[in-house]
Image: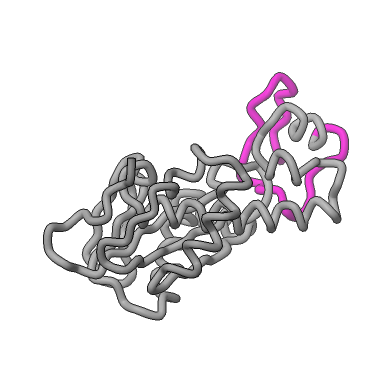
Amino acid sequence: MSLASHYSETSLIECGCDEAGRGCLAGSLFAAAVIFPYDYVNPQINDSKKLNEKLREKLREEIIKDAIAYAVVEISAQTIDSINILQASIKGMNDAILQLAIKPELLLIDGNRFHTQTGIPYHCIVKGDGKYISIAAASILAKTFRDDYMKNLDQEYPQYNWKSNKGYPTEEHQNAIFQYGRTIHHRKSFQLKSQLKLIFP
């Protein structure tokens, strides 16, 4: 079943926004914004978490090809530590919107918290990446761009196995932090919640 194309009954230029990497212990957060042509349909596009890696990669190319405009931005671990993860998510989505080649008229934001730096009207939609195609597309771009970034970091820091865990707090990743310490890519403001009870100073 295809996701909804529009939030509004009027033909506004709608932009879907989402982020990836919010719950990670390491690495940047990535945020994306996507504007599709009016009545765009692609039945395979869905919440990135519901898709396997191969399909996400395929859909990334289709989204980039078919979108009227899109943007993907990176928010560093240092910025996350400085302003907190919620504000980093909001900053990332605002930065992506500002980089679009076309100015949208309505923003569809995945989640329940946002404030705009653009003056563009917006709606926060809980689990919006499973309801609206533009938000789902943004989730796919943010996820795939971030995964590529973590795979590249893994070449420099193979002991953390970021190519597989992508910086999320798996037991393997937490054990590696316990054994090898943290890197410049780890978020110092994030605490480990495991049997190790290791807390960053």
Front in this rendered view, residue 66 or 117: 66
Q: Main secondary structure of the magenta part?
A: loop
Q: Residue furthest left?
A: 10
Image coordinates of residue 115 in percent, x first then y, are: 31, 59
Q: Is residue 164 magenta?
A: no
Q: Position of residue 88 (x, y in %)?
A: 49, 56
Q: Determine whether, in the image, residue 187 is placed left or right of residue 155.
A: left
Please, which residue is most extreme toward the bottom here?
A: 101
Farthest residue to the top: give it. 195
Q: Please give the name of the residue rendered at 21% of the width and 54% of the height, measured from the top-left corner.
A: 7
Q: In the picture, residue 146 is in which quadrant?
A: bottom right
Q: How is the image coloured?
A: one colour
Towards the viewer: 10 or 96 = 10
Can residue 112 be seen here? The reply is: no
Q: How many marks?
A: 0
- Picture residue at 50% right of the left edge, 45% below the top: 48
Q: Is the N terminus in the top left, top right, bottom left or bottom right quadrant?
A: top left
Q: Answer above or below: position of 9 versus 192.
A: below
* x then y, percent, for residue 29: 57, 54
State yes or no: residue 190 in magenta.
yes
Q: Is residue 86 left or right of residue 124?
A: right
Task: Give the magenta range.
Answer: 178-201
- The answer to whether residue 171 shows anywhere in this view is yes
Residue 131, above or below 150: above
| Residue sitting nearer the eye, 95 or 60 | 60
Question: Residue shown at 71%/41% (left/top)?
Answer: 201
Residue 159 image position (x, y, % from top left): 86, 42
Residue at image coords 47%, 51%: 139
Q: Is residue 175 left or right of residue 25?
A: right
